[in-house]
Image: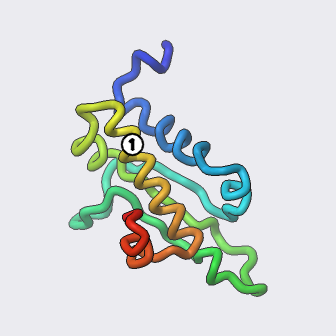
């Protein structure tokens, strides 16, 4: 079945991969020890669309090694409920969340993202 026939929720992972692929090659190449996963729902009581867990690149020292990968989690349920009625809107919002969480991997805080109007 061609991906054009899938509904937006079924294309969620594709949208996430497209967001990563949209990064400049040098930036993608600087991502280190990080995985992107999709889960259906955030932890109970947490109104999240995405979550970064790990040690940002800016906080890694020469002692960093043998660590589990950083984890960027995208929460399909909330994103689809909010934006799934429009495939283009869902694609844009998935991209926004992926890039937001990747910014945290690079050590950019929410405060700084707000400051540069990228939150």
In this view, the residue in front, 101 or 76, is 101
Is residue 117 toward the left or the right of residue 16 in the image? Answer: left
Q: Is residue 19 above or below residue 46?
A: above
Q: Which residue is mark 1?
A: 92
Q: Considering the numbered disc 1 on the image, is that residue within a helix, a strand or a loop?
A: helix
Q: Is residue 107 above or below residue 1?
A: below
Residue 113 found in image quarter: bottom left
Q: Position of residue 28 (x, y in %)?
A: 67, 54
Q: Position of residue 117 (x, y in %)?
A: 38, 66
Residue 26 found in image quarter: bottom right
Q: Identify the residue shown where x is 56% and y is 75%.
A: 107
Q: Residue furthest right?
A: 62
Residue 58 found in image quarter: bottom right
In this view, the residue in front, 65 or 99, is 99
Q: Residues within 10 Å of mark 1 (few under 14, many from 20)?
A: some
Q: Identify the residue shown where x is 59% and y is 57%.
A: 35
Q: Identify the residue shown where x is 23% and y is 42%.
A: 81
Q: Position of residue 75 (x, y in %)?
A: 36, 52
Q: Residue furthest top?
A: 1
Tell me, what colour scheme is on the image?
rainbow
Q: Identify the residue shown where x is 41% and y is 55%.
A: 97
Q: Position of residue 3 (x, y in %)?
A: 48, 20
């Amino acid at each position: 079945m061609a991906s054009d026939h899938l509904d937006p929720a079924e294309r969620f992972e594709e949208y996430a991969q497209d967001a990563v692929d949209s990064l400049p090659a040098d930036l993608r190449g600087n991502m280190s020890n990080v995985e992107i996963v999709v889960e259906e729902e955030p932890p109970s009581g947490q109104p999240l669309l995405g979550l970064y867990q790990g040690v940002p690149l800016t906080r890694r020292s020469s002692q960093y090694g043998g660590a589990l990968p950083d984890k960027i989690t995208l929460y399909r349920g909330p994103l689809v409920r909010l934006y799934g009625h429009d495939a283009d809107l869902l694609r844009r919002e998935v991209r926004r969340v992926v890039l937001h969480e990747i910014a945290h991997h690079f050590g950019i805080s929410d405060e700084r993202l707000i400051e540069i109007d990228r939150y």
